[in-house]
Image (cartoon, rainbow, N blue to C red):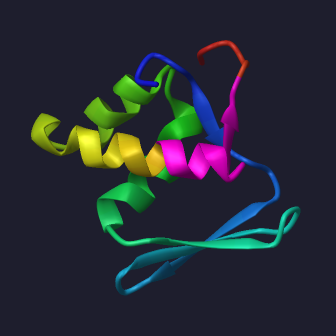
Amino acid sequence: MLDRRLAVHPQVAVRPEPFGALAYHYGNRRLNFLRARELVTLVESLGEHESVRAAFDAVDIEPRRWPSFEKALASLAASEFLIPDERAAA
């Protein structure tokens, strides 16, 4: 997953909350809770980076925390909140 390029699905809205954020998918009507502000920042920045690994580095998440964030991203991808981003790196 770290070497893939991901982006937030165009039908997903992320609303900041004190605990992190609510993410709602208007297409499949699913709601997800992003329970860490760092995860919110990571998710919102994914489309700006050539890979998930580059996004982790840019957001400055400690490597020891990467596995739990990778698990969260995998769950979001399985729920279609995140999709593959095939655009060329900017």
Placement of 41 over or under 2, stated as above or below: below
Q: Nearer the viewer, residue 39 or 77?
A: 77
Asked whether, in this view, residue 21 is left or right of residue 13, the answer is left
Placement of 17 over or under 26, stated as above or below: below
At 24% across and 39% down in the image, what residue appears? 66
At 26% across and 39% down in the image, what residue appears? 67
Circle count? 0
Placement of 87 over or under 20, stated as above or below: above
At 33% across and 47% down in the image, what residue appears? 69
Q: Is residue 7 one of those drawn in magenta?
A: no
Which residue in the rendered view is the most extreme toward the top?
88
Asked whether, in this view, residue 18 is left or right of residue 73, the answer is left
Quarter of the figure with residue 39: bottom left
Which residue in the rendered view is the most extreme toward the right?
27
Q: Position of residue 25 (x, y in %)?
A: 76, 65
**Residue range corresponding to the magenta coloring:** 74-85
Q: Position of residue 16 (x, y in %)?
A: 50, 78
Q: Nearer the viewer, residue 55 or 72?
A: 72
Q: Is residue 80 one of those drawn in magenta?
A: yes
At 54% across and 33% down in the image, what residue appears? 48
Q: Quadrant of the C terminus?
A: top right
Q: Nearer the viewer, residue 30 or 86?
A: 30
Q: Position of residue 84 (x, y in %)?
A: 68, 29
Q: Position of residue 59 (x, y in %)?
A: 30, 43
Placement of 24 over or under 3, stated as above or below: below
